[in-house]
């Protein structure tokens, strides 16, 4: 197969399925051959990311990801994409394993926020406890001179219920709960824009987009970027040249 990219997924599987569905349905097609070429590694056995980030005595998820990246690197994909926000805890270590361009979903999303909402000084952040605990998005926002609003103590339990109880355990999206979280961040904490810092939250946005709030959805953004890059490379652009604009430092 020529000109393909590798997806490091399975964190979780339903969220990865959402990313794949987005790239399949957003690319413009007239025939089968217009779809994108990709290899999906749906490694559902990768240990829980938040558990390790909060407690290093828990299984370290880096080694599973390392094995997946090295295995795919042997096939020489045009670029890597990893549709899991919390797994970017090990982004630098994973990207160092290969010369293949490795997109940073979180960084790309933050720059999209700056481009689309240049006058906003802060963004509401809802995410896994792992991402919050290790300041993954907070640090990325600081890089570009913006602040993250995390809301009060009532926010994280609602987010956890939506991510873990509803989506990961039951495979459903509670529309009302998702909208309540967005409304609370907007009305109570003054967030004109809300960042969906977990791909399960991106799935909630896909399934329940009927709300009036501005969101930055990293999975939706990386899906569009994946399509853009894959088509440029298919049309003859060098992969490193094509991805250069998104390799933010």
Image (spheres, rainbow, N blue to C red):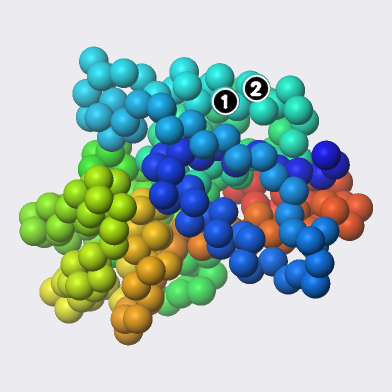
Look at the picture and state if 9 lies above or below 192.
Answer: above
In the figure, is residue 77 to the left or right of 71? right
The kind of secondary structure element at disc 2 is: helix
In the figure, is residue 110 to the left or right of 100? left
Between residues 235 and 120, which one lies in front from this camera angle? 235
Q: Which residue is mark 1?
A: 68
Residue 210: give x, y in percent of width and height: 35, 81
Residue at 83% across / 52% down in the picture? 233
Instruction: Tell me if label 1 and label 2 are in contact, CB under 8 Å.
Output: yes
Residue at 51% across / 74% down in the picture? 116
Q: Residue furthest bottom?
A: 212
Q: Residue furthest top?
A: 57
In the figure, is residue 234 to the left or right of 58? right
- The quarter of the rendered structure image containing the N terminus is top right
Q: Residue furthest right?
A: 236
Between residues 41 and 116, which one lies in front from this camera angle? 41
Residue 95: give x, y in percent of width and height: 60, 30
Residue 87 can be seen in this image = yes
Label at residue 71: 2
The kind of secondary structure element at disc 1 is: helix
Residue at 73% across / 71% down in the picture? 28
Residue 229: give x, y in percent of width and height: 73, 55
Q: Within 10 Å of the Cα at label 2, are there few (<14), some (14-19), or many (20+) other Cα atoms?
A: few
Marks 1/2: CA distance?
5 Å
Residue at 48% across / 56% down in the picture? 18
Residue 240 can be seen in this image = no
Look at the picture and state if 211 lies above or below 10.
Answer: below
Residue 4: give x, y in percent of width and height: 76, 43
Quadrant location of residue 155?
bottom left
């Amino acid at each position: 197969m020529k000109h393909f990219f590798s997806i490091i997924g399975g964190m979780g599987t339903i969220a990865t399925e959402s990313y794949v569905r987005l790239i399949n349905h957003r690319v413009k097609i007239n025939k089968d051959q217009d779809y994108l070429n990709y290899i999906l590694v749906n490694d559902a056995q990768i240990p829980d990311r938040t558990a390790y980030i909060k407690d290093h005595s828990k299984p370290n998820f880096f080694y599973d990801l390392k094995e997946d990246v090295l295995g795919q690197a042997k096939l020489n994909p045009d670029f890597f994409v990893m549709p899991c926000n919390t797994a970017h805890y090990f982004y630098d270590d994973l990207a160092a394993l290969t010369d293949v361009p490795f997109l940073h979903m979180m960084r790309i999303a933050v720059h999209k926020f700056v481009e689309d909402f240049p006058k906003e000084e802060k963004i509401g952040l809802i995410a896994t406890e792992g991402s919050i605990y290790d300041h993954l998005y907070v640090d990325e926002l600081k890089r570009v001179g913006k602040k993250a609003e995390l809301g009060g103590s009532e926010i994280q339990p609602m987010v956890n219920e939506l991510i873990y109880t509803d989506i990961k355990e039951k495979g459903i999206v509670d529309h009302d709960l998702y909208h309540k979280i967005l409304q609370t961040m907007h009305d109570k904490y003054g967030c004109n824009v809300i960042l969906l810092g977990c791909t399960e939250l991106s799935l909630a946005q896909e399934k329940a987009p009927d709300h009036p709030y501005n969101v930055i959805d990293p999975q939706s953004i990386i899906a569009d970027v994946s399509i853009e890059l894959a088509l440029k490379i298919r049309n003859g652009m060098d992969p490193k040249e094509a991805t250069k604009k998104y390799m933010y430092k």
